């Protein structure tokens, strides 16, 4: 990262969304402006907001509203779709069951993955084999989330086309063997309101999710409009709040994109601290490489960053499974 950011940039990506599949996209001046802003955001912050993304605000809000309804249900009802190793790590986890760097997180969640069948990828994906565990209550939960997943996958592909151009590559640089058949991870997360009091009689920080980077290529965060909880760390170690902006997604880049760019783009540390007394939800979509992709620095990025490979190759599925298997206490 070349400068220390104090705020997270907002990018109107509507020209990219409209034109990224046009054979002449490289000559489009409006797209070129979006690409320039994406490059700057990925180099300097690793985080950015997107507006003009084409997913209806009504659907984005409906996804959050139905998530609130699910987490409002009695614990016994939520447990009907409990996550375990026998479900392929898919389903509901109670507060404190998810671990970040050895410390329990103060959130509950439904974890979902693109579905895998036994023996796919030579057994690499077997720990995650299974179908997603959707609740029957609230009604239409599965249908709504599956519609949303399709739109998030398509939006992510379009943003990645912009990032490919930002790096000086062809528009489809990340397709084919890297992410032509992308895996995805989907976390529907609830953060209880802050109730605890410190020695001075003031609410103390409740870490909903400890400081971490994301594993894959690109994350789309759909967060409640009225509670600020997501924080991003800059180079100086300051935590910058990702204040909710209605109608936007917060986007950030993950570890696999950091490797592909040979560190030109950084996967930035972030955390969640809900100091509000109100319950907060966040629906996070993670766009990942092909499950069996061998991820290594792209030649064009090595040339731009001093000519030396800074990272070993990593098989995405191995990286993910290794993380998932150490993520839970139950």
Image: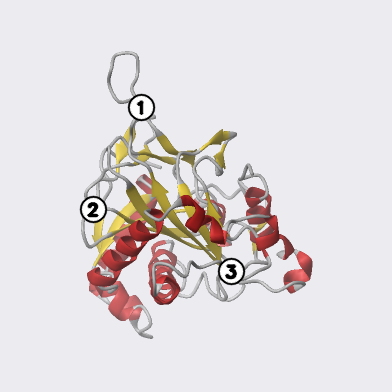
Q: Residue at x 21, y 58 (%)?
A: 246
Q: Secondary structure at mark 2?
A: loop
Task: Report which quarter residue 127 is drawn in.
Answer: bottom right
Place of residue 28 in the rendered image (x, y in percent of width and height, measured from the top left): 27, 77
Alpha-carbon distance for marks 1 and 2?
23 Å
Residue 230 as seen in the image, left or right of residue 122: left
Q: Secondary structure at mark 1?
A: loop
Q: Nearer the viewer, mark 1 or mark 3?
A: 1
Task: Say which mark, if any, is on residue 225.
Answer: 2
Alpha-carbon distance for marks 2 and 3?
34 Å
Q: Looking at the image, is 272 positioned above or below residue 49?
A: above
Q: Nearer the viewer, residue 129 or 78?
A: 78
Place of residue 102 in the rendered image (x, y in percent of width and height, measured from the top left): 60, 34
Residue 325 as seen in the image, left or right of residue 22: right
Circles 1 and 2 in contact, beta carbons < 8 Å: no
Q: Residues within 10 Å of mark 1 (few under 14, many from 20)?
A: few
Residue 270 as seen in the image, left or right of residue 112: left
Task: Report which quarter residue 146 is drawn in.
Answer: bottom left
Q: Nearer the viewer, residue 198 or 327?
A: 198
Place of residue 95 in the rendered image (x, y in percent of width and height, measured from the top left): 49, 43
Q: Earlier in the sequence, mark 1 or mark 3?
A: 3
Per the image, the residue denoted by label 1 is 196
Q: Secondary structure at mark 3?
A: loop
Q: Nearer the viewer, mark 1 or mark 2?
A: 1
- Point out the image quarter for the N terminus: top left
Q: Is residue 164 visible?
A: yes
Per the image, the residue denoted by label 3 is 178
């Amino acid at each position: 990262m070349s400068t220390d950011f104090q705020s997270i940039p907002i990018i109107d990506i509507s020209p990219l969304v409209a034109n990224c599949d046009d054979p002449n996209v490289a000559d489009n001046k409006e797209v070129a402006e979006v690409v320039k802003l994406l490059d700057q955001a990925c180099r300097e912050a690793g985080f950015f907001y997107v507006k003009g993304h084409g997913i209806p605000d009504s659907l984005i809000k409906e996804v959050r509203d139905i998530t609130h309804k699910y987490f409002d249900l009695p614990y016994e009802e939520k447990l009907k779709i409990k996550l375990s190793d026998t479900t392929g790590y898919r389903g509901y986890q109670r507060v404190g069951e998810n671990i970040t760097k050895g410390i329990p997180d103060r959130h509950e969640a439904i974890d979902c993955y693109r579905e895998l069948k036994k023996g796919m990828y030579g057994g690499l994906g077997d720990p995650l084999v299974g179908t997603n565990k959707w609740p029957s209550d609230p009604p239409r939960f599965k249908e709504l989330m599956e519609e949303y997943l399709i739109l998030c996958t398509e939006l992510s592909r379009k943003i990645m086309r912009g990032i490919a151009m930002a790096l000086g590559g062809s528009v489809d640089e990340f397709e084919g063997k890297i992410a032509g058949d992308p895996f995805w991870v989907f976390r529907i997360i609830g953060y209880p309101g802050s109730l605890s009091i410190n020695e001075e009689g003031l609410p103390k920080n409740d870490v909903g999710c400890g400081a971490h980077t994301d594993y894959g290529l690109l994350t789309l965060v759909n967060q409640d409009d009225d509670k600020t909880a997501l924080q991003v760390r800059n180079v100086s170690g300051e935590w910058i709040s990702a204040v909710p902006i209605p109608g936007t997604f917060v986007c950030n880049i993950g570890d696999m994109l950091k490797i592909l760019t040979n560190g030109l783009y950084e996967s930035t540390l972030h955390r969640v601290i809900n100091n509000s007394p109100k319950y907060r939800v966040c629906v996070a979509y993670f766009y990942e490489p092909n499950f069996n992709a061998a991820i290594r620095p792209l030649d064009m990025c090595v040339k731009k960053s001093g000519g030396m490979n800074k990272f070993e190759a990593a098989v995405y599925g191995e990286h993910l499974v290794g993380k998932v298997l150490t993520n839970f206490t139950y």
